[in-house]
Amino acid sequence: MNARFLFLAPLLVGLAHADEAAPNADKRALNLAVQRDGQRNQSAAAAISLPVGQSAWLQAGVGQSRNHDAASVTTYRPRQVSVGGGVAGKAWQAGVNASQRRDGERLRQTDVAAVADWRPAECVNVGVDALRRQGRVRGTVAGAPVEQRVKGHGVGVHGAVAVTSRLSVYGATLHNRYTTSTTQPAGGGGLLAGVPLLGNRVSAVNRDEAALDRSHQIGATWRVSERLALNGEVMQDHVHDGGSLRSLQMKAAIAAGAGWTITPGIGRSRGPQGEGTNYGLLGASYAW
């Protein structure tokens, strides 16, 4: 599970509780998530949010991922820290989150994300997203050391509709504009063309770390009972250096009692080079 999910989860859950006395009453929560795929990529993240006053909240998170780059036979292990916060009204919410990933001198990435949600009707939620990124990654291509830098920004929209008391559908799209430069820092070879260093290691597990020009997502949730909900989701991303990442996943949210919700899931993704892999995920959240 990615950090963006951990950031957005309190916002989306909060809209379902907009009738509570305080708009931020549901922001006292702990979220944990792990993912792993068949290509030895994995991620783990944790985030905690706490209400401030009657309408605001603060959030902080940590995480680490393991990304295996088959082209350069390199394994990246970036660690991540994030801080954020927001404010909520009776039928709207807005938040911002800043995160940084770092794996020594090999990878550095800073993201700032903002989201705003509005509930125009009881069963409808719409919102806008914005993202700004700056990063640098070092590796090897064909035995030669290279350094690639990326910076850019993106905007998107998302929405959800409760079709019935049990069925809800949602969708989101995000368009980014990135510029990249690839050089040989040691050899002084100048700019290199067509070196897809950033795109070599893209998978569903680490898609938040990739430079994606476009991202599309649709899904549906069926509430089986008060203690069980089933979710299906399809994602398609266009990688900046070429190719697409397609993912399909299924999840179940299980109310375990005492404030805990457990979310196991499975999925399959196909990367830019046409390779397919299965992956599993497990999430847990605690509200008090």
Image: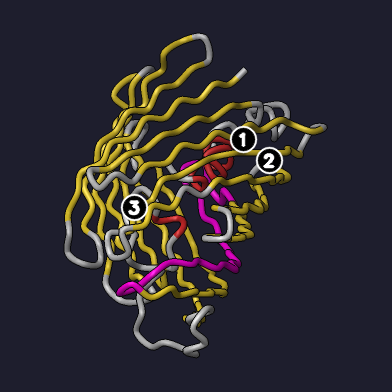
Q: Residues within 10 Å of mark 2 (few under 14, many from 20)?
A: some
Give the CA distance from mark 2 to mark 3: 45 Å
Start-end of magenta stretch: 118-143
The quarter of the picture where the N terminus appears is: top left
Q: Tell me residue 22's x, y (percent).
A: 73, 30
Quarter of the figure with residue 42: top left
Give the CA distance from mark 1 to mark 3: 42 Å
Q: Residues within 10 Å of mark 3 (few under 14, many from 20)?
A: many
Tell me if 22 is positioned left or right of 221 in this view.
Answer: right
Numbered label attached to residue 68: 3
Foreground mark, 1 or 3, reads 3
At label 1, the amino acid type is: Ala
Q: Label 1: which residue?
A: 18
Most common SS among magenta residues:
strand
At label 2, the amino acid type is: Lys
In the rendered view, would you say 60 is above or below 188?
above
Q: Is residue 134 magenta?
A: yes
Residue appearing at x 21%, y 57% in the figure = 270
Give the CA distance from mark 1 to mark 2: 6 Å
At label 3, the amino acid type is: His
**Closer to the N terminus: mark 2 or mark 3?**
3
Q: Is residue 137 magenta?
A: yes
Q: Are marks 1 and 2 in contact (CB under 8 Å)?
A: yes
The quarter of the picture where the C terminus appears is: top right
